[in-house]
Amino acid sequence: MLRLIQYNETEYFKQKIATFEELISLLKDDRVQWIDVETCEQAIVEQICQYFGIHHLIVEDILNVKQMPKAEMFENYLFLAAKMLYYPQTKSDEFQIEHISFVLIKQTVISFQQFPVDVFDEVRKRITDKIGRIRFKKADYLFYRLNDTLVDKYIEIVYNLERKLNELEEEINENAKRNEVITQLIALKSDINSIRRIAMPLYSEFVRIKYEVGTFFHKHTFTYLQDLCDHLLYVQSSCDNFKEVINDLMQLYFSFLSQDTNNVMRILTVFSTIFMPLSFLVGVYGMNFKYMPELEWKWAYPMLWVIMIFIGLIMTWYVKRKYWL
């Protein structure tokens, strides 16, 4: 339920915790601390927030899984609500959206997750193995690093959507008759809109954090925040571009369908034109009049076939000459 990671330049401590009381007994002020709440159960969230003096309205935002990305600055802490996007372990092409919240307070970062699934294994590995500069930085850098990992997953999903768009474009050019294409395009458009709805407000909040929250971040961390904003801006612009591409592909798809329909109608029209005089002859000699001189003639039937074949050949030659077929 709870995971506590503590570290500084020389020391490192990690432990899974079952109760709030055990968590409190292990907290220290001389290290950077990451309290990872793996599932947002109301009781444990309220206990942690009460201990750290976090406002009860923030508790509601943490527990509200439909809360869109937002940031709130208080005197002693910074709150950020975001969305975690990831592909499940089943290797499905459908990504999952999970609500996640962060609180940055003094030397402590608290993360509240909707489900016990996250994308922070790389961050934990960097802390454990002392990779990079994370062990030499303070809690503000850890806060940045966790959010940078989230945004990297956004970019990974954007790359995957771009790949799927390219595949659909090739499929449309090769075979536009498949009905599944339009369904896949609509699903992709829905996914892109979901990512854009998440990335846009998160970008706005990080821009606001970068310019308004000087007390929570060291001066050197602002460069990393700018990099985070650039990545979110890339995600947002990519989604806008993908929407235009999807609209173009849908128009291309319907153009191919319209062209196929026109070709079918043209062929049907040509055959109708060829058989129209033949139908006229058959209709005339199919009438049940008593006095029809040709009916008494011995060669009437074969002669009618000769005439119809001749007319059919003439009509076919004329159609080909006019490039109607």
Image (tube, rainbow, N blue to C red):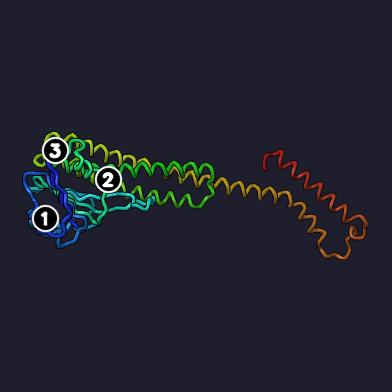
Quadrant containing the C terminus is: top right
Q: Which residue is mark 3?
A: 137
- Amino acid residing under circle 2: Ala
* Amino acid type, residue under disc 1 in the picture: Leu
For label 2, the SS is helix
Could you tell me which quadrant the N terminus lies in?
Answer: bottom left
Residue 111: image location, x then y, percent:
18, 51
Of residue 200 and residue 314, the one placed in the foreground of this image is 200
Which tag is nearer the camera, tag 2 or tag 1?
1
Return the x and y of residue 71 as percentages of the image width and height.
Answer: 17, 48
State the count of labels.
3
Q: Secondary structure at mark 1?
A: helix
Q: Are marks 3 and 1 in contact (CB under 8 Å)?
A: no
At label 2, counting other C-alpha atoms closer than 10 Å, the crowd grade (few under 14, some 14-19, many 20 or more) is many
Q: Residue at x 25, y 43 (%)?
A: 122
- Label 3 or label 2, whichever lies nearer to me, is 3
Q: From mark 3 to mark 1, how far is it between C-alphas?
A: 23 Å
Between the C-alphas of marks 3 and 2, the distance is: 27 Å
Q: Residue 88 location, x and y as percent?
A: 33, 52
Q: Disc 3 residue type? A: Lys
> Left of 198 or right of it: where is 215?
left
Res 74 seen here? yes
282 or 186, nearer to the observer: 186
Residue receiving disc 1: 23
Q: Based on the displayed image, in which of its 4 quarters is residue 292 positioned?
A: bottom right
Label 2: which residue?
A: 199
Q: Residue at x 25, y 37 (%)?
A: 230
Looking at marks 2 and 1 on the same chain, the residue that comes earlier in the sequence is marked by 1
Of the numbered discs 3 and 2, the one sitting upstream in the chain is 3
